[in-house]
Amino acid sequence: MSTITKSVDVEADVPTVYNQWTQFTEFPRFMEGVDRIEQRDATHTHWTVSVAGVTREFDATITEQNPDERVAWKSDSGPNHAGVVTVHRLGDTTTRVTVQMDIDPDGFVETAADKLGVLDHRVQGDLDRFKKFIEDRDGHETGAWRGDVDRPGQHRA
């Protein structure tokens, strides 16, 4: 299993950046290799991705979501991976987005990509394109989902 941690600073406030990150169906607009995401309900998504010319599909579950703080997920099928995206206020109009992913490459292509650092570069490239996507929109998100999803075993008082 490999861990990837990457960050980017976005010229937009925390709520705008967080709101955009909750719009999973927009991910193909800035994530390389992501062909389509279906939002099945508040916590379940279905992904279609292309890696080195191979199309794969998998399901993922949002395991934690706290507005203006974090979104965490885990795969339910396909390549075994999990991660968390956090947003941090650096200033009134600047937000740091950090992605941490644990991934267990599935098959020769993904294993080779991991060993060669391709996955690291892809995640950073996706973050850089996310930054451009939101900044080109003059800091306006395409939508928002502000609900909370508690970690398993955690309940709010």
Image: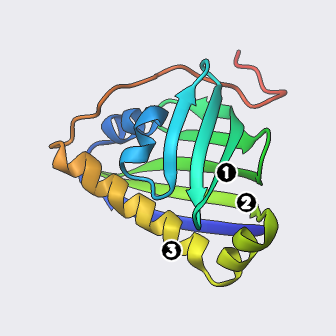
Q: Earlier in the sequence, mark 1 or mark 3?
A: 1
**In this orientation, which residue lies closer to the viewer: 80 or 154?**
80
Colour option used: rainbow
Amino acid type at mark 2: Asp
Q: Quadrant of residue 1?
A: bottom right
Residue 2 image position (x, y, % from top left): 75, 70
Q: Is residue 140 left or right of residue 100?
A: left
Amino acid type at mark 1: Gly
Q: Is residue 60 left or right of residue 123?
A: right
The residue lying at 77 percent from left, 65 percent from top is 105
Q: Which residue is mark 1?
A: 83
Residue 108 image position (x, y, % from top left): 78, 73
- 20, above or below 116, in the image: above
The residue lying at 39 percent from left, 25 percent from top is 144
Amino acid type at mark 3: His
Q: Which mark is residue 67?
A: none
Q: Give the number of the mark in front: 3 or 2.
A: 3
